[in-house]
């Protein structure tokens, strides 16, 4: 299985390179794998726009995601536990949350720029919106999935509400919370790139870099940037999976 | 399993081939584009409104109104356009980087941009822009070019500037909310910022580079080859429109009003900052090529030869002024 898994991408890349060499595909629209590698090199050595090097684009993007994501975690997990715990609160807040949830984070961009300007705050806000709901919903369902009998049993044993909260609810919902966090960071990362399309004050960011490469007509660098975004998203996911495995060994 | 591989290979082949043959058919209708609210493109609007194209028997179809020049050039790369009014800088970048195959067949205007700061800003000279955040409509737009060229003439190292990209309609709001220190845009945005009482000109592009070439009419090489008469007619209509603007500035302003929806005082003020002319300027284009190369946007082995082929006065020379 392992071999076939790698075989297909390799075969496709070879076909792609051959098609480019034979000029079946116009290299402007579809740069060859080799050109993309050179584009990647240019991103590191020359930068896009020239002088703005790749490593800083990555750092700025990660920085924006970090703030949006951390804010989402800080707000969504406690709120999710509360809403999972209290039926009354959940019924009260559900209509508002259900109304805001389907609004795509990107639809918030114009208003976010108006509220927070074009700096880190508006980008972090967009990422926050992308990450918040998956974490919230997974936390709620994590709490709800805890078997009621466990809580009843704890009560009969005279456990305090605090104990029930910290010894049953939180540990019990952790697997679901972690799933929410993984989905959240994925969506946050996707949203970030689009948020950076609209303009960023610092002049750095992977989305911004791709748009600049478009302005200067370097499709090789656009594709190199796209692959990098995919790769970083993939690595973040692997990282969170490792954390998940550590934290929920008992499961 | 083998079947799946064959299927996937065929699928890839089909996708790649269809990608290479995406060109649409090229009828006699000219698929044209221009920039949103760019008063440099007033000759096009005048020619459309005064019926100059019909009189010369060309059928113009506006395929798109774009927000910045590089977007127009991407549309050429996708073979979705035949001709367009666009800045000389994005056109040069796209052709030099092999993205689009177009020729500059006529000038449209020279000058016509300005660096704007807030009305009550402390900034009074270009040199004070050092370390400030300045918005441009896009990388490799004429304005990006003018800003960098103007400031490097003042011996301000480009790394001391924080140049960011904002679409012109968003620039005035960003300036008003102190999110940027200055912006450079095509008219009528600098004039609009003044009419609204938000901004003032720190420098017009005339002061940065007197008589600098700005927008041109570009035509795809393929279309030009097949429809020389049509391209010539557009060039001729552009000349007629420029003459009309010169002779009837007030009527032309009314047409600009119709296309931009801005106030008449904005339009009149903006028009004073633009010089409409059809005459192509090869020396100016060479300066573009050299400076774009210096910026690292393009990389040409023979700039002079590039200019000779890109700037094509053949049609202009056949026209009556």
Image (cartoon, coloured by chain):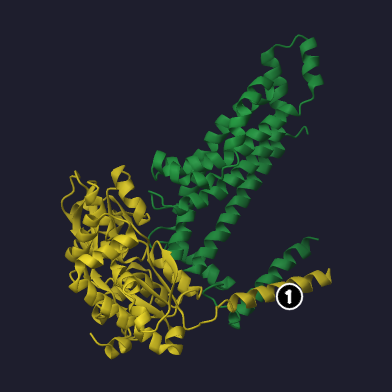
Image position of A146 with respect to B29: above or below = above
The percent coordinates of residue A32 (x first, y second) are: 57, 73
The outermost residue toward the top is A158
> What x and y, as percent, mark residue B193?
25, 51
* Residue B310 appears anywhere in the view: no
What color was chain B assigned in the picture? yellow
Answer with left or right where residue B6 lies relative to residue A104.
right
Q: Could you tell me residue B135's position as x and y percent?
A: 32, 54
Q: Is residue B270 left or right of residue A205?
A: left
Letter of the chain in green: A
Which quadrant holds residue B87? bottom left
Graded by Cα atoms within 10 Å as few (under 14), some (14 to 19) or many (20 or more), the crowding at tag 1 reads: few
Instruction: Tell me the residue that label 1 is attached to.
Output: B10
Query: Which residue is rendered at x = 69% and y = 66% of the image?
Result: A9
Q: Residue at x 48, y 60 (%)?
A: A210
User: Label 1 is found on which chain of the structure?
Assistant: B
| In the foreground, B208 or B44 | B44
Is disc 1 placed on a helix, strand or loop?
helix
Of residues B263 and B91, the one nearer the viewer is B263
- The residue shown at (33%, 44%) is B179
> Measured along the vertical axis of the image, is residue B18 above or below residue A118?
below
Assign the N terminus of chain B to one quadrant of the image. bottom right
Asked whether residue B1 is in view, the answer is yes
**Measuring 68% from the left and 35% from the top, which residue is drawn there?**
A138
């Amino acid at each position: 299985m392992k071999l076939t898994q790698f075989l297909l991408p390799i075969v496709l890349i070879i076909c792609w390179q051959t098609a480019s060499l034979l000029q079946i595909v116009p290299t402007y629209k579809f740069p060859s794998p080799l050109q993309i590698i050179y584009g990647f090199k240019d991103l590191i050595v020359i930068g896009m726009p020239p002088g703005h090097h790749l490593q800083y684009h990555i750092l700025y993007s990660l920085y924006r995601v970090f703030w949006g994501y951390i804010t989402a975690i800080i707000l969504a997990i406690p709120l999710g536990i509360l809403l999972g715990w209290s039926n009354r609160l959940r019924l009260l807040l559900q209509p508002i949350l259900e109304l805001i949830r389907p609004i795509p984070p990107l639809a918030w961009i114009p208003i976010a720029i108006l509220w927070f300007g074009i700096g880190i705050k508006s980008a972090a806000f967009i990422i926050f919106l992308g990450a918040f709901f998956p974490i919230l919903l997974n936390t709620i369902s994590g709490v709800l999935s805890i078997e009621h009998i466990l809580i009843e049993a704890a009560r009969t044993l005279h456990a305090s509400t605090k104990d029930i909260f910290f010894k049953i609810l939180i540990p019990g919902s952790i697997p679901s919370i972690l799933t929410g966090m993984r989905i959240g960071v994925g969506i946050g990362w996707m949203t970030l790139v689009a948020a950076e399309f609209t303009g960023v004050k610092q002049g750095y960011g992977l989305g911004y870099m791709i748009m600049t490469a478009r302005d200067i007509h370097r499709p090789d660098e656009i594709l190199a940037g796209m692959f990098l975004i995919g790769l970083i998203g993939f690595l973040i996911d692997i990282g969170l999976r490792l954390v998940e495995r550590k934290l929920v060994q008992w499961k | 399993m083998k079947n799946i591989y064959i299927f996937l290979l065929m699928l890839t082949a089909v996708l790649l081939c269809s990608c290479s043959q995406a060109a649409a058919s090229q009828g006699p209708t000219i698929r044209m584009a221009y920039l949103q609210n760019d008063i440099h493109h007033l000759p096009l609007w005048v020619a459309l409104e005064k019926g100059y194209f019909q009189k010369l028997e060309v059928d113009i179809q506006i395929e798109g109104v774009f927000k910045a020049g590089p977007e127009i050039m991407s549309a050429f790369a996708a073979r979705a356009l035949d001709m367009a009014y666009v800045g000389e800088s994005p056109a040069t970048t796209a052709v030099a980087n092999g993205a689009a195959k177009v020729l500059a067949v006529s000038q449209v205007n020279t000058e016509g941009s300005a660096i704007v700061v807030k009305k009550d800003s402390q900034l009074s000279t270009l040199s004070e822009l050092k370390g400030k955040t300045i918005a441009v409509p896009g990388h490799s737009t004429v304005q990006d070019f003018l800003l960098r060229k103007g400031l490097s003439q003042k011996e301000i190292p480009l790394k001391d500037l924080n140049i960011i990209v904002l679409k012109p309609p968003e620039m005035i709001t960003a300036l008003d909310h102190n999110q940027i220190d200055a912006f450079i845009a095509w008219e009528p945005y600098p004039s609009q910022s003044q009419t609204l009482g938000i901004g003032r000109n720190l420098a017009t592009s005339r002061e940065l580079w007197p008589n600098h070439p700005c927008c041109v009419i570009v035509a795809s090489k393929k279309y030009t080859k097949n429809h020389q008469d049509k391209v010539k007619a557009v060039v001729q209509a552009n000349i007629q429109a420029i003459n009309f603007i010169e002779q009837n500035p007030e009527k032309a302003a009314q047409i600009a009003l119709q296309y931009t929806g801005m106030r008449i005082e904005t339009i009149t003020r903006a028009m004073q900052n633009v010089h409409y002319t059809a005459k192509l300027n090869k020396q100016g284009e060479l300066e573009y090529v050299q400076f774009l190369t210096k910026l690292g946007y393009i990389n040409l082995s023979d700039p002079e030869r590039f200019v000779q082929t890109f700037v094509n006065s053949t049609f202009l020379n056949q026209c009556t002024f």
